Image (tube, helix red, strand yellow):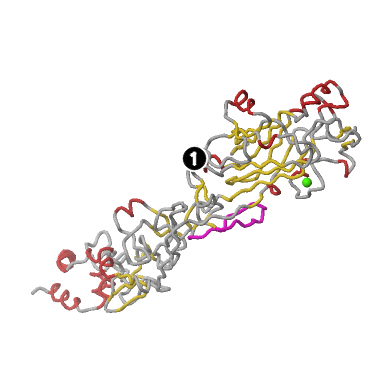
Amino acid sequence: MNIPLIFLIIWLFEDRFLQYILCHRLPQTGIQGSKNHLRGTNEIDNIWLKNLATYNINTHESYETRNSKKTKHSIVKDTNTKSNGSFPSLIDVAPLANITANATCGTTYPGSDETFCKLGGSSQCSVCSDTVTDKKHSIAYAVDGDLSNWWQSPSLEQGSQYEYVTITMDLQQEYYIWYVIIKCAISPRPANWILERSIDGTHFSPWQYFVANEEDCWQRYGLLATTSAAANTVPADNETLCSTFYSKIKPLENGEIHAFIAKGRPGCVSSCTVVNTNELKDFTRARYIRFRFQKFNIPKDKYSSLSDPSFLRRLFYSIKKISVGAQCICNGHATKCKRSFDLKSQCDCTHHTCGNNCEKCCSLYNQKPWKEGTASTVAVCEQCQCYGHAATCRYDAHVDAHNISLNIYGEYRGGGVCINCSKHTSGINCEKCENGWYRPSDIPPDADEPCLPCDCNPFGSTGICLTHDTEFTEGGKVVFILDYYL
Ligand SMILES: [Ca+2]
């Protein structure tokens, strides 16, 4: 036996030598191995863990068995047993709106008053003035909740163009609109007008036409008239109605208009509290609401008076209150809407969903794809298994398809991938240690400090431990020893 071989045998029993053969070799050495691999694996092989991890359906806890030790993952399964989504109550969002009118009594000619009279009383005349508080009739008065003041349009005496007046409401955000109610003030309800909706404030679509007689429905809009207060059954989710019920000239004051947007339509289910079809969601969804008044209500016996200027000052529109029954768009994940700091409505999201509209799963709840809750299904976002070492995860369909993401119940289901694993951990579930670190076998993956630095001798080693058990074999070790030392 030659001398180098004797030294080699002696050195085999030295701890320092074991470090050389068990740590990754430097590029020029040809030594591989890991002492840390022997001290305790720093890897969780997915297949291996798959066999060891168990989930107790009764206690909703999962355990990982390693070296006869049980590591409780302290998982509590979501106890939400509801079978349907959550939906917020309707709220009146009119007071939150930016409301504008393209014409207002008292502002037609700045500095000059405008005289008007009620249609029902020859002596009941007054003036609009933009400079006198109790003579102002700002459009803001239509949404202030105060029934003693009102918005009023210029009378027809100011010009024939004032038969066409448009009011626009910007609700500041999108809602599902269920109804619009108008309380008129000192004038009759408009004879003809169009209630419109818009998402962008530029492109408007009709929600409902209001006309004084059935012929106008057909001649103006090509629609059959709805003559009752509200249609009990509307054949289609996106059908635009034409109603005559709310265009009657009487009462001459304080008349109301009720426009039910969703009621009676196929997509309105659960006693009409949930919009459940995409068609009806599109139809009821709006940020902007527009009121296009197009014709005054005039008593038939007064038609001959239209050439009399003193009669024209009796023709105008007036509104003391507009109510907009709206439902926050929470995608089936909130039972209420709360007011945010910027005075917007914000879904109080449940089911581990986040976003203004609960339109996504919260940061650490992406084990499954986000889904919308419906009237018949609940869709709870599931927490990723990151062992407490990551605050966020993402859903990956490829990972899901290959069953390589461990869920919090100890099953390989879902596609959650932990992001920015901390404490030197890595892997889909933060179950591994990053290069240069290892996890001893007696330390569970959810330990506060699961990874320790590799304990490799800097001479002849990169200091990086093996990352997989399979990289280290008895045969490989011998080959590398002989290759380097003999
Ligand atoms: Ca008012």
Circle 1: is it few (<14), some (14-19), or many (20+) Cα within 10 Å? some
| Percent x, y of residue 257 | 69, 40
- Name above or below for residue 461 compared with residue 334: below
Left or right of residue 107: residue 361: left
194 or 224: which is nearer to us?
224
Residue 13 sits in which quadrant?
Answer: bottom left
Tell me if residue 310 can be seen: yes
- Name above or below for residue 238 compared with residue 349: above
Give the magenta range: 335-351
Q: Which residue is mark 1?
A: 279
Farthest-out residue, left: 1
- Residue lying at 22% horizontally and 64% vertically, measured from the top left: 470
Left or right of residue 359: residue 184: right
Farthest-out residue, front: 301
Name the element at disc 1.
helix
Residue 300 sits in which quadrant?
Answer: top right
Question: What residue type is disc 1 on?
Answer: Glu
230 or 352: which is nearer to us?
230
| Percent x, y of residue 309 | 87, 24
